[in-house]
Amino acid sequence: MSGSRQSISSVLIPMQQRPLLIPSVCIASIQDYSRPEENYPETQWLLGDLLWRGIKIPVVSFERMNQGRFAEFSATNRLAILRRTSKSDKLPFYAMVVQGVPQPLTLIREEVRNSAEEKGPMEKHRIILREIPASIPDLALLEQKIDEIVSKNQTLEASPSA
C-alpha cells in the first residue's frame, strides 16, 4: 500500500432528520431563511421561488422529497444555495432548506461505512460517517424532479386562459 489516502472536500449539512453529505463544490452560498414565493401548489416539497443574485431559483424541502417529516419554520432554518450537478441554462442553482450551518469536512474513505438502514427514495446511500448517521442525496434525481415541476408550471403559465 502506498499510504496515501484519497480525500474529498465535502460538507455535512444539518437537516431535521439526518445530515446530508455532499461535495463542497455544490455549495454556492448559505444564507438566512426567507420564505419563498409559493408558485407550486401541486407539490409539497417544492416550497416556491426565491430571488437570489438577480435570478429566480426554486426552494426545496429534501425531507419532504424523501418522504420524511418537515416542520417548515424554525429559528435554525437556513437556505443552502446549491449549484446543479447537471447542466441547465434555465436553472443553474436551487435552494434547499437546512437546519443550521453546514460543516465543511475532508472526507476520507476509511471514515465512512454503509448503514443497515433502508434508504429513502431521494437518497443514493445511507452511511455512518465518523459514527454519525448521514445520507448521500441523489442530487441528479432531485434536479430532474425540480426540472419536471418547474417546466410544467412554466408551461401552464404560458398557456392562454380559456
Image (spheres, rainbow, N blue to C red):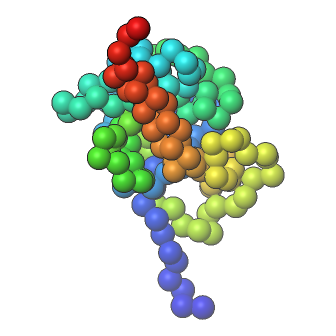
**Residue located at (73% from left, 45% from top):** 119
Image quarter hosting the N terminus:
bottom right
Task: Tell me: 119 left or right of 72.
Answer: right
**Residue located at (37% from left, 20% from top):** 159
Quadrant for residue 9, please give it.
bottom left
Furthest-bottom residue in this view: 1
Task: Tell me: 138 left or right of 40.
Answer: right
Of 119 and 19, the residue lying toward us: 119
Numbered label tally: 0
**Residue located at (50% from left, 75% from top):** 6
Q: Is residue 74 above or below residue 79?
A: above
Residue 135 at x, y = what percent? 62, 46
Quadrant for residue 19, please give it.
top right
Furthest-front residue in this view: 162
Task: Tell me: 110 left or right of 81.
Answer: right
Of 61 and 19, the residue lying toward us: 61
Image quarter hosting the C terminus:
top left
Residue 71 at x, y = what percent? 58, 17
Q: Is residue 33 above or below residue 12?
A: above
Q: Is residue 3 above or below residue 90?
A: below
**Res 33 seen here:** no
Residue 91 at x, y = what percent? 34, 40
**Residue located at (75% from left, 53% from top):** 115
Of 98 and 146, the residue lying toward us: 146
Residue 104 at x, y = what percent? 42, 50
**Res 108 seen here:** yes
Furthest-left residue in this view: 54
Task: Tell me: 71 left or right of 68.
Answer: left
